Amino acid sequence: MLIEKTVSGFLDEVASNSAAPGGGSIAALAGALGAGLTSMVCRLTVGKKKYADVEAEMQQLLRQAEDIRAEFTRLIEKDTEAFNSVMRAFSLPKDDDDQKNFRSGAIQEATKSAALVPLQVMELCERTLPLALEVATKGNVNSVSDAGVAAEMLRAACISAALNVRINLGTIQDDSFVHDTSLKAKSILTSVDQKSVEILHHVNAVIGSNIRS
């Protein structure tokens, strides 16, 4: 399994001549990293006297972030599985009309599934960013930059996942599915962009927006 590999082993797998794991799994990984950083800031806040008034809230945010991180992690594997299902559908026999029709239907269904996995990644990004905002504004101020990185990882994950949604929609013949999925993806992108900008605005206000030499 991909998630059981070492970091080095995973990177070697990504860099290999195999088409999977590809961009979809990497998008899910980026989301998992964003959720993980959100959890880290929570843990660096909990137990500190200075933040006693937000202790219970940070504990709750930690549980939510960890649940989401587990979902992102599952989608790293699921995206590769979805891609492999599409490839298996393309390899089905097409010697006669019945086989061709069956193969075409299998390809369409597999491609729909391949589009829905990165859409799930996008949805998780949208769910995680409000948590990142809370830890950025209420968590340990010494880790506010980590909350900012979490936001940027989640934004990158969402944009990356959207690319994978779009490329799969391009070959799907179900117009209603394509329309509904496209609208949902666009809505999520807008929401994620707004939330990530809000977090980065706060982070820059705390640490300063200029790079000093």
Image (cartoon, grey):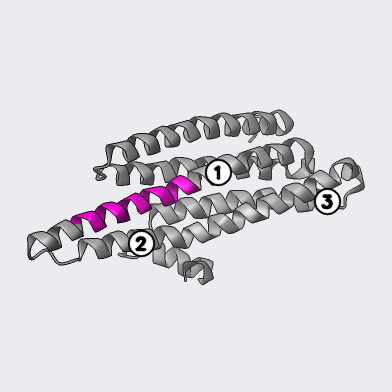
**Lower sequence index among marks 2 and 3:** 2
State the SS at label 3. loop
Q: Which residue is mark 2?
A: 20
Name which residue lies at 41% across and 48% down: 116
User: Relative to residue 129, is residue 117 depicted above or below?
Assistant: below
Magenta range: 104-120
Res 46 label: 3
In front of the other: 31 or 117? 117
Q: Which residue is mark 1?
A: 125
State the SS at label 2. loop
Q: Quadrant of the C terminus?
A: top right
Q: Position of residue 106 (x, y in %)?
A: 25, 58
The amino acid on which the numbered mark 3 sits, given as a three-letter code, is: Val
The amino acid on which the numbered mark 2 sits, given as a three-letter code, is: Ala
The amino acid on which the numbered mark 1 sits, given as a three-letter code, is: Cys
The answer for how far apart the CA atoms under marks 2 and 3 are is 39 Å
In this rendering, position of residue 136 left or right of residue 194:
right
* Residue 113 part of the magenta-drawn span: yes
